[in-house]
Image (cartoon, rainbow, N blue to C red):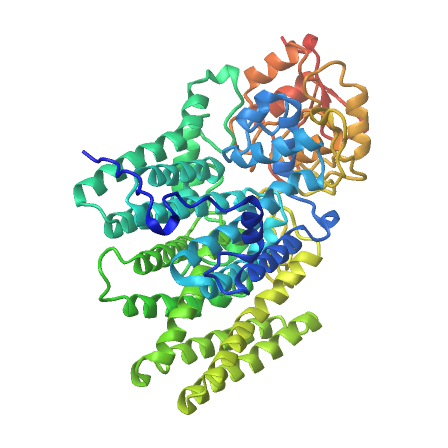
Amino acid sequence: MTTLAPPPAPTAQDGGHRAAPPAAGSRLRRLFTGAPEDPRWARPALWAILVLATALYAWNLSSVTGNTFYDAAVYSGTRSWKAFFFGALDSGSFITVDKPPFALWVMGLSARAFGYGTWQLMLPMVAAGTGSVALLYRVVKRDFGAVAATIAGLALTLTPITVAITRDTNPDPVLVFLMLLGAAALMKAVRTGRLMPLVWSGVAIGFAFNTKMMQAYVVLPVFFLVYLWATRLGLGRRIRNLAVGTVALVVSSAWWMVVVDLVPASSRPYIGGSTDNTVWDLVIGYNGFGRIFGASSSVGSQGNGASFGGEAGLYRLFNSIMGGQISWLIPFALVALIGGLVLRGRAPRTDPKRAALLLWGGWFVLHYLTFALAEGTFHPYYVTAMAPGVAALAGIGGVMLYRAFREGSFARWGWVLPGAIAVSAVWAVVLLQRVSGSGTLYTVAEVVAGVAGAVAVTGLLLGRFTGRQRLTGIAALAAVVALLAGPAAYSASAASSSTNGTNPTAGPSTGGMGGGGMGGQRPSGSGGPSGGTSGATGSGTSGAPSQGQPPTGTGSTGTGGTGTQVSSAMVSYLKKNQDGATWLVAVATDQTASSLILESGQPVISMGGWSGSDDAMTLAKLKSLVKSGKLHYIVVSSEGGQSTNSEISTWVKKNGTAVSAYSGLYRLDASDVG
C-alpha cells in the first residue's frame, strides 16, 4: 500500500517558516522571461516562435476558403443541436459527414459564440496549431533543454504542410494538438510513475480518435512501448497502470460511437461513409483498414491514393508531390534518431532522454510507414501528423550530435553531424530545383540553403580541427538556416496565397494533383466541392450566432457529379418554392449538398454521401419524405458523373414534374406518391 510522505518540516534556513510561493508579479515576469535557470534568450525566443506560428496560420484570413464539406456541417450544427451532436451535413440531419464530430464541435462552439464566418471557424484551428508548437517545445525542453526545444518548435512552425492545413477547416490541426497532449501526459507518467497522467494520455488520444478515428491510433504502439520500457515502476505496476490507461482510452474513444449506434436508425442521420449505417463500420472500413489496404466494404476506399499523393511506396514522401510538403528534415531526423539511440545506448532502462528518443522516433517511423505504404485514399495534408516527430528529432538530434561532435572522438562522431547537415542541405537544394522558375522566393531559398549548408559543414570541420568553439557555434547557426530556408519559403507561400480548401498544399505547383498542378481539385468521381461557393468566407454576424447566415455565393455552385448545373438562379427558385419543406432539395453527393447549404442557408439532402454511393436514400424513404411534405425537389440527372440511384431516378422521372428551366430538377408532392 502506497503512503504519502509527510510535508517537510520547516528548517533553520527558512526561519522556521515554509517559503512563500512566488508573488503574482513574479509569476507574470517568469511568463515572459522564463525560469531563472533558463538562458535569458530562451523565453523571448519561444514567444517569437509562437508569434511567427500565429502569423503564418492567421495571415490574410480573407483568402481562406476552408473545406465546404466541413464548413457546411459546422453551419448546420449552429442551426440544430441534433445536427451538432451527430456531425450531420445538413441541419435536417439526413446524413453525417464521414468523420467523427469533435473538430466540428470545436468550430461549431466558436461559431455559436461569435457568429458564423471565416475567423470564427479558423480561430480554433489557429489556436490548435500554435498550441501544438508550444506543447512540443515544452515536452522537448523538459529533457533536452532550451536549444533543442527552440529548434523543434521552429521546425514544426515552418513545416509547409502544417502551415497549409492549419489555414483550413479540415480536422487535422485539432488531431495533432490532441495527440501532442497525449504525448506530453505520457512522458509525465513515465517520469513520475503516477497513474493519472497515463489516464489523461489515454483520454487525449480518445478525443483524437473522435476527431479522425484510426489515424489517432498510429502512435499507440510506441506509447505502449515507451511506458512499459522506461517507467520507474515494477513490471506488475506498469502493466496494471497501462491496463487502466487503456480503459480510459477505450471509453473516451468509443462513447460517441456507442451512443450513436444505440440510437434507432429512424431517429438519427445516416452514417456517411458506412455501408451498414453504423459508426463501427466507418471505423474499421472507410476510416480504418480501407485507408491502409485500399479496399474495404466502404465505398470511399478504392485505392485512389496515387491521385493525390503519388503511388504508394517507401519513396512516396520524397516524390514531386510530397517532397516539398514534409521531407525537408527527414534525412536529418533519421540520422539524429540513430545517432541519439547510439549515444544513449548504455543508459539505464529508465533514462528519460532515451525514452523521449523512442517516443519521437517511433512517432516518426510509424507515421512514415503508414503514409508511405497506404494503398487507400491519401491526401498530402495527412502527413502533418508526422511533423511533430520530425521536428522533435531535428531539435533533439541536433543538440545531441553537436555535443558528440565537440566532445566525442573525431573518428567516431566527427563526421556524423557534418554529414547529416550536408545530406539534408543537398536534399533541400534538390527540392528547390524541382520548382525552379516558380518565383524569386524559391531561388533565394535555394541559394541560401546551398551557401549556408556549405558554410555550416566547412565551419564545423575547421572549428573542430582548430579548436575554435566560436566558429563551430556560428556553423551550427548556419546549419539551422540551411535546413529551414526551404521550408520557410514554402510556408511563406502558403501563408500569403489562397489554398484549396479540399486538398490544401504549400508552395508552387509540382504538376501533380496532390501538389498544386490542378489547384488541389479532386478528379471526377472522387468527390470534393466543385463549385464557386467557398466555405466560410463571410465576416460573421452578431446577435444570435446560431441564426447567422452563411455567406451567399454568386454564380454557379457546380454540378456535384450529377451533370446538372446548380446555379444561384436555381437556388433562388428553390427557396421561393420551398413551401414549408424541411429540405430545400435532394442531390446526389455531399459536395453538391454542402455548396448548396452554404449558398442557401437551408438544409439540403445528400442522397449518396461523399462519393455518391452511400445507401442513405431509399425509394421508400424518399416517398415518405415527399408524402409528409418534408421534401419537394430532387435532382436526378446522371450525365457526367455520379448518378442518382437508378430506382429512385426512374420513379422520380415517372411521377414527378420536371422543372423545365433547370435540367434534371423535378418537383414532387404528396399527391405524386401512390
Residue nearest the viewer, comparing 400 with 577: 400
Residue nearest the viewer, comparing 654 with 469: 469
Q: Quadrant of the N terminus?
A: top left
Q: Position of residue 16 (x, y in %)?
A: 36, 44
Residue nearest the viewer, comparing 619 with 555: 555
Residue for point 48% across, 50% down: 135
Q: Position of residue 20 (x, y in %)?
A: 45, 44
Q: Is residue 117 above or below residue 27?
A: above
Q: Position of residue 655 (x, y in %)?
A: 67, 16
Residue for point 62% across, 14% down: 625
Q: Quadrant of residue 7?
A: top left
Residue for point 52% across, 31% down: 272
Q: Is residue 22 visible?
A: yes
Q: Is residue 15 above or below residue 582?
A: below
Q: Quadrant of residue 286?
A: top left
Q: Position of residue 225 (x, y in %)?
A: 27, 50
Q: Quadrant of the C terminus?
A: top right
Q: Is residue 416 above or below residue 17?
A: below
Q: Is residue 276 visible?
A: no
